[in-house]
Structure formats: structure tokens, C-alpha cells
Image (tube, grey):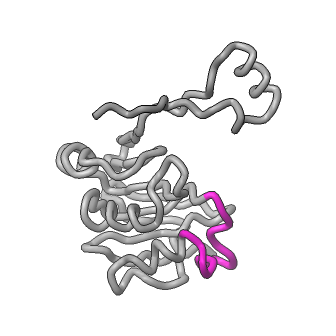
Amino acid sequence: MAADHTNELSSAFVADPERTNLSSSGLGAYVGLANGFVVIFTNGLKVYLSGDTGLTSDMTTIVRGYFRPHLAVINMGDIFTTGPEEAAFAVTELIRATAVIPSHVNEAATQGGAAVAGSRTARFLDLLPPGNRGGDNRGRGVRGTSVFLPLSGITMEFNGNGRCEVGCQGR
């Protein structure tokens, strides 16, 4: 069954001057199809960037099955993206990368190097199997996957196998 709506964002949801420009031309803001990218670095590191997407079978068949990423950066802001529940499922059941960075949560995710209680990031961590929970940034294993919180001002560096080498402590 075809969708009975467009993939455009109504100009009512856009601020001026874009709102006026779009409305006067009878246009909306196209938000596009669900998408993600796999980037392969010169050290061999394969990173899956989920982009603004929900759960898709491609996460298993193409992302995991073909590319076998070492690191996944998964967006989970609940608007045009997975939420914490879907992201936890994608990480544990579909993608299964060596390391994961939750991203694009549309709220303050961390404070003092730990997930903010009640945040989407905290919910994501709570949904992961035991051994993944905690407030430090040392990584927590999900079937061999470590989860690292993105922290302002901290640059993380990963080797070609997806192991965090620099900035892993987050402090």
C-alpha cells in the first residue's frame, strides 16, 4: 500500500526566511528517504553512520552482512530517526559493530562525562544487556560491542578494528 502523504516537511514547520520562500513557491522542505552511509578509512576502519533513519532490514543484510562495520554512529532522537528502543535493538540484533556511539538525541545527553538520568541516551544504555551500563566512557560490551558516549570537547580515535585508542575515557 502506498503512503498517502509526501516526504516533505510542511513549510509551517520551518522558520523565516525559508518559510516564506517555500510557501510563496508552493514547496515544502524535502527531508528525503531514510538513509545511512558506510565510510571506510585508510586504516581499514569501517564506520556506519545511520543518518536519519529508522529500523531497516538493510542494517542486517547490507550494513552487517556486506560491509561489516567496526564502528556504528547511531542517531536516536525519535524525530526522523530511531528512538532509544529501536537503536538498542539495531545495535544488539542488526548491526553488531565492534563499537557504537549514540548520537543526534536532540537533548543534553551527558553531564560530567555520564549520561543524564532520564535522557534518551540513559534509556539506550539501560536497554543494553548487562555489562553495557554505566556512566563512564570506557565502553560496555554488547556481544563484543563497546558503547562510547559522545562528549563535548573530547575527540575519540579508533584503530582499524574499531577499538578506541584515544579519548576513550571521556574525561
In this rendering, is residue 98 above or below 3? below
Quarter of the figure with the N terminus: top left
Q: Is residue 107 left or right of residue 127?
A: right
Q: Which residues are magenta?
A: 106-120
Image coordinates for residue 64, horizontal then vertical, percent: 23, 51
Quarter of the figure with the C terminus: bottom right
- Work out which residue is located at the far right of the displayed protein and give it: 16
In this rendering, is residue 8 above or below 50? above
Q: Is residue 133 magenta?
A: no
Image coordinates for residue 98, horizontal then vertical, percent: 31, 64
Q: What residue is at 22 percent from the left and 43 percent from the top?
A: 62
- Work out which residue is located at the far top of the displayed protein and give it: 25
Quarter of the figure with residue 99: bottom left
Q: What residue is at 63 percent from the left and 77 percent from the top?
A: 116
In this rendering, is residue 155 above or below 139? above
Give the dominant element type of the magenta stretch: helix, strand or loop.
Answer: loop
Q: Is residue 111 magenta?
A: yes
Image coordinates for residue 44, horizontal then vertical, percent: 31, 47
